[in-house]
Every structure is written in structure tokens, then in C-alpha cells.
Amino acid sequence: MADAADDAEVDYSDHFIHSVYEMLARFGVDPHEGRSGFTNEAGDARIALAVPGSKVGLSIDGDRPDPLLEDGWHVPHFSVQQLETFALVYRQLGTLAFEHIRRESMESQVKTGSQEEERLLAAILKANLPTPDRNFRIARPNGTELTVPDFVWAELKVAFFMDGLWWHVGRDDDRTLKMIADAATDKERGELLMKNNRSRAERDGDNRSELASMGWIILSCTDKDLATGQGVRKQVTRIGKTLQQQRKLYDQLNKFEPENPDSGSPDDRDKKLMDLFS
């Protein structure tokens, strides 16, 4: 007969359950199939987490898994302390992995990013999106360099640009920055800024149009868009949706391609992709 502790309601909103969900997802379990605080139809069994479709789950102190075990379920038991320790280690390892990827990206980059760019990169990595290439030089068909976006996912042909006064002024153009700094008056300095800003903006716009004509998806934001956490999350969501859509498009294209590595060039692949939606 169940004792009083067994009948007590268990709070399944603790953070360790979320850590378990994340770990199971990394092992290939669809989080949407999981249910926390699961109770069977008879109402005589309750466990912390369950995947009813495959009859697996886990129980913690205070759960009632016996009826499920008798029905052929696989339900290992963990104490709350064990899961809390696991969650702590899991979060720390996640932070370690994130810092490794972020610092490796910073060390290998050609350009020096702003605080806004680093903030966006951190959010991209924490969202478990593919790590962008920050050094990818996109060339024209004749081999000349077209542009170096801030973030690139080359296999999906997605490029991300950050726009803003500092970026258009030319963060790598020391001569331009020196001219602006040496201007005699604030008026002259402002005129130089506006002239250079217009020149950069026109050139960037032309380059991006050419890039789009080559089949690339172009995303962009401004420094101001990343001034708040909500703004950063908005950009991460936009990037995530775009990468997902591109992945689906290329997966669809692959279904129509023969299994022959010599069946076509990357340009042929892009043409086929465009034909699917023409």
C-alpha cells in the first residue's frame, strides 16, 4: 500500500527535468513525444517523465511507477538529488562547450566584431544553431571577391550582415577613420561620415543584389536591432527559421537528384532548386 510520501504531489517543473529533456533530445528522442508528470489512464501510476509511444520514462522520489513496470514499461528510478546534480553538471558542460565554440570562432575570424556581433553569435550558439563561418569570402564567377558577410552558412547559401554607422564607415579602413578623426571641425567630420556612409551603403546594396542573383539568401540587421535581449532573440529566430527552410529545400532537391557524385556542379544544383519553385 502506498505511504503518505507516495501520495504527495510532485513538482515536475524543476529545472532538472528540462535538462533531462535536452539530453534525451541530443540522443534522438523527440521532445514533443515526452510528457512530464505523466499519469496513466487508470490513474494508478505516475512518473516524472514519460514517452508513452515507446513505453519508456523515468521516475523520481514520490512517483508510482509499479503499474507501468508491470505493463512492460522501462522506467529507471533516480533520486531528486541525483537529477539535480546531473542538471548542474549538464549546465556547466553546456557553458564550457559554448565558450569553446565562441572563443574558437573569435580566434579564427578575419574581422574584429563589435559587442553586438559577439552578443548575436553567443545567442546563435546557445540556441544550438549551426556555427556560422565568419571568414567566408564569397567570390564572383570570375574569381574576384564580392563580399565577406559577418556570418555565413555556406552549405545552405545563407549570409547575414550587420549594418550600422560603424560598419558602413569602414571598421577595417584605417585611412578613412584617420581622415574623420583628423577633421578640423565637427561639421567637416560629420560631412565625411555622411559621404562615406552613403558610399558604403550604395556599394553594399549593389554587392548584396549581386549576391542574391547568385542564389544566396541574405539576412541583415542593425546595431540597434541588437540593443535589447528581445531584439537579439528576434534575429536568432529569424536565422533559425531561414536555415530550417533552406535545409528543407535542399533536402527536397536531393530527392530528385540521382545518386551520382558527378551528376552536376553546385551551379546545376542551384538551378534545379530554383526550378522546383518556378
Image (spheres, helix red, strand yellow):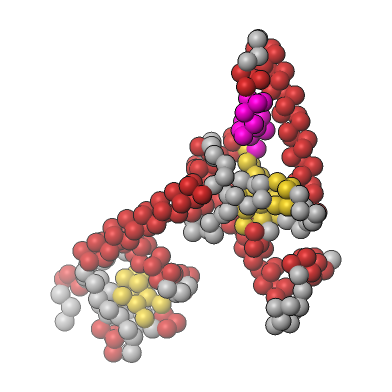
Please give the name of the residue rendered at 22% of the width and 66% of the height, measured from the top-left corner.
82
Taking the image as shown, residue 1 lies to the left or right of residue 237, namely: left
Indicate the position of residue 140 as horizontal and vertical percent values. Answer: 77, 53
Q: Is residue 198 above or below residue 11?
A: above
Taking the image as shown, residue 238 lies to the left or right of residue 14, namely: right
Taking the image as shown, residue 66 lies to the left or right of residue 233, namely: left
Taking the image as shown, residue 278 lies to the left or right of residue 228, namely: right
Please give the name of the residue rendered at 78% of the width and 35% of the height, measured from the top-left corner.
202
Indicate the position of residue 265 as horizontal and vertical percent values. Answer: 76, 70
Indicate the position of residue 91 as horizontal and vertical percent values. Answer: 34, 57
| Most distant residue in the top direction | 185
What quarter of the picture does the N terminus occupy? bottom left
What quarter of the picture does the C terminus occupy? bottom right
Q: Is residue 193 visible?
A: yes
Residue span colored magenta = 163-177
Q: Is residue 58 magenta?
A: no
Q: Is residue 255 visible?
A: no
Q: Is residue 173 magenta?
A: yes
Snapshot quadrant of residue 176: top right
Please give the name of the residue rendered at 51% of the width and 49% of the height, measured from the top-left corner.
108
Number of labels in the image equals 0
Helix, strand or loop: magenta stretch: helix
80 or 120: which is nearer to us? Answer: 120
